[in-house]
Amino acid sequence: MRITTTSARRRRAGSAAAAAVLGLLAAAGAPAYAATDGSVDRIPDTPPASHSAPLGTAGSAQSGAGVPTGISRLAQGAGRQVAITIDDGPDPRWTPQVLKTLRENHVKATFCMIGTEAQKYPELVRAVVADGHRLCDHSVDHDVTMDHKPVAYQRQQILEGKAMIEKAVPGVAVTYYRAPGGAFTPDSRAIAAASGMRPLGWSVDPKDWSRPGLEAILSTVEGKLPRQPTVLFHDGGGDRSETVAALKRYLPWLTERGYSFSFPARTTP
């Protein structure tokens, strides 16, 4: 009898575990724009034990802070809205030029900042905020392999990066988290959302960081735009002269075609 009872308990436990895993997969959902957006959950085939997602945390549709854990790829609002996002700064040469271009075109953007760069150039963080733009945590030092690291390391990269940015502008909220290279995991999304930051992806990527040429950048961003797109540009990590030139032409192009500018969706799925 003891053997039969134990076996039944094991079967029930196995069924509960399987249901929990299925629940996690269902909650995560299929990523939008998966063919063009690299910002999807990346989990090694055989992750270390410390990398596993805690049940009831990463699998939840929303965090305890009320911020969804799903990756945002849409501009907030309805209709012809575009969200411009700027990554890898702040940079003393390129960030001021990007700010000037945005200001001239009456555009507000979201700046995804690397913690160590924000620590080096706090005056640029303040300049971004002073112009009415929003802040996004892009981790401490842009480790694109952090999705293969233990959860404790992911937490450190996310929360310390956020703290570095906040130190430059006390009292100003950092409302998004973008994983380096789009390397999200269920754990990193849950950690970000629990601290009030919506995981932020993109739906249009011109790969301006690789300096493919001005016309190549424009061809990508002026191509067929998805609904309420989030467009990825860079102000840090190297020579961003092509990015600045592209923004100078792209922003008026969008305005002429009836688009308006908003921030990425934060509290809606």
Image (cartoon, rainbow, N blue to C red):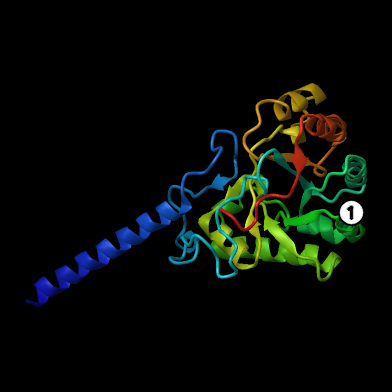
Give the amino acid at mark 1. Asp
Q: Nearer the viewer, residue 93 or 149?
A: 93
Q: Horizontally, is 135 left or right of 45 in the view?
A: right
Tell me residue 102's x, y (percent): 87, 43
Tell me residue 96's x, y (percent): 92, 46
Give the answer, above or below, for where 88 lies relative to 214: below
Q: Quadrant of the N terminus?
A: bottom left
Q: Horizontally, is 182 left or right of 186 in the view?
A: right
Name the quadrant containing residue 23.
bottom left
Residue drawn at the location 73% of the way across and 27% of the way down: 222
Task: Report the label total.
Answer: 1
Residue drawn at the location 54% of the way across and 38% of the way down: 34
Q: Identify residue for label 1.
A: 131
Tell me residue 225's x, y (percent): 66, 31
Tell me residue 62's x, y (percent): 53, 62
Q: Horizontally, is 141 left or right of 107 in the view?
A: left
Q: Nearer the viewer, residue 206 or 209?
A: 206
Residue drawn at the location 44% of the way across and 61% of the way down: 49
Q: Residue furthest left?
A: 1
Q: Secondary structure at mark 1?
A: loop
Q: Nearer the viewer, residue 160 or 125?
A: 125
Residue drawn at the location 31% of the way across and 58% of the way down: 18
Q: Residue furthest bottom?
A: 2
Give the answer, above or below, for where 50 lies relative to 224: below
Q: Horizontally, is 111 left or right of 191 in the view?
A: right
For disc 1, the neighbor class at 10 Å (few under 14, some 14 to 19, many from 20) is some
